C-alpha cells in the first residue's frame, strides 16, 4: 500500500531531522541498501569468475588462444568487481546489515584509532590491554 502525500512528506521530514541530529546513525540506516547491492554484485562477480574459468579452459582445449584470453580477461574483471564489492562491505558477520558492533574485522574492540606515541609505547599499551582482558 503506497504512502499518501502527507505520510510521504512526514517521513521525509523525519529522515531529515534524524540526519541532522545523528548523521552516523542515519548513514548506517542508509547503508543497508548499499550492502544489499554489494552482495548482489559479489554474487554476480563470483558467477562471472566461474564462467571466465570455463571459457578460458574451453579456449585452451580447443586451441583457440583468443577465447582463452577472453576468458582470462573476464576472470580479471570479475575478480576486480568482487574485491571492490568486498571492500565496500557485503554485510556483517552476524548476517545483519548495518555497522558491525566493534568495527570491521576487529571483534571486541572499537574502531581503529590513529597510532600515538612510539612503537614501544604502543606495544606496552597492547600488553596492558591483553592483561586486562584476560583478568590477570
Image: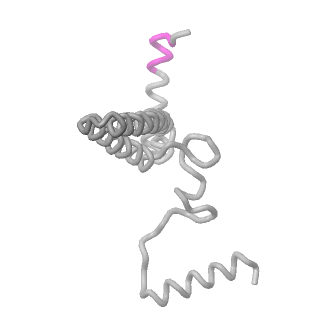
> Which quadrant is home to the C terminus?
bottom right
Q: Residue at x 42, y 85 (%)?
A: 117
Residue 48, placed above or below residue 108: above
Task: Looking at this view, name the residue that lies furthest to the right.
Answer: 135
Task: Looking at this view, name the residue that lies furthest to the bottom.
Answer: 120
Depth check: give the residue in front, 14 or 84.
84
Spot occupied by residue 15 in the image (x, y as percentages of width and height): 46, 32
Q: Residue at x 45, y 47 (%)?
A: 86
Q: Is residue 33 visible?
A: no
Residue 48, placed above or below residue 122: above
Task: Looking at this view, name the residue that lies furthest to the left.
Answer: 66
> Which quadrant is home to the N terminus?
top right
Q: Residue at x 49, y 34 (%)?
A: 36
Image: magenta residue range = 3-9
Spot occupied by residue 110 in the image (x, y as percentages of width and height): 56, 63
Q: Residue at x 42, y 87 (%)?
A: 118
Whether residue 18 is in magenta: the answer is no
Depth check: give the residue in front, 55 or 60.
60
Which image quarter: residue 62? top left
Residue 80, placed above or below residue 3: below
Numbered marks: total: 0
Q: Identify the image's colour scheme: rainbow, by chain, secondary structure or one colour.
A: one colour
Does residue 42 appear to the left or right of 91 in the view shown? left
Q: Is residue 47 visible?
A: yes
Spot occupied by residue 91 in the image (x, y as percentages of width and height): 54, 43
Secondary structure predominantly adopted by residues drawn in magenta: helix
Amino acid at each position: 500500500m503506497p504512502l499518501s502525500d502527507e505520510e510521504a512528506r512526514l517521513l521525509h521530514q523525519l529522515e531529515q531531522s534524524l540526519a541532522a541530529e545523528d548523521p552516523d546513525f542515519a548513514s548506517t540506516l542508509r547503508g543497508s541498501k548499499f550492502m544489499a547491492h554489494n552482495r548482489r554484485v559479489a554474487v554476480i562477480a563470483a558467477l562471472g569468475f566461474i564462467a571466465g574459468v570455463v571459457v578460458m579452459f574451453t579456449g585452451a582445449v580447443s586451441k583457440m588462444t583468443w577465447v582463452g584470453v577472453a576468458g582470462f580477461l573476464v576472470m580479471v574483471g570479475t575478480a576486480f568487481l568482487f574485491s571492490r564489492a568486498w571492500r565496500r562491505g557485503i554485510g556483517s558477520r552476524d548476517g545483519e546489515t548495518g555497522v558491525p558492533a566493534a568495527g570491521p574485522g576487529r571483534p571486541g574492540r572499537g574502531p581503529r584509532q590513529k597510532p600515538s606515541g612510539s612503537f614501544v609505547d604502543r606495544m606496552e599499551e597492547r600488553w596492558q590491554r591483553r592483561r586486562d582482558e584476560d583478568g590477570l
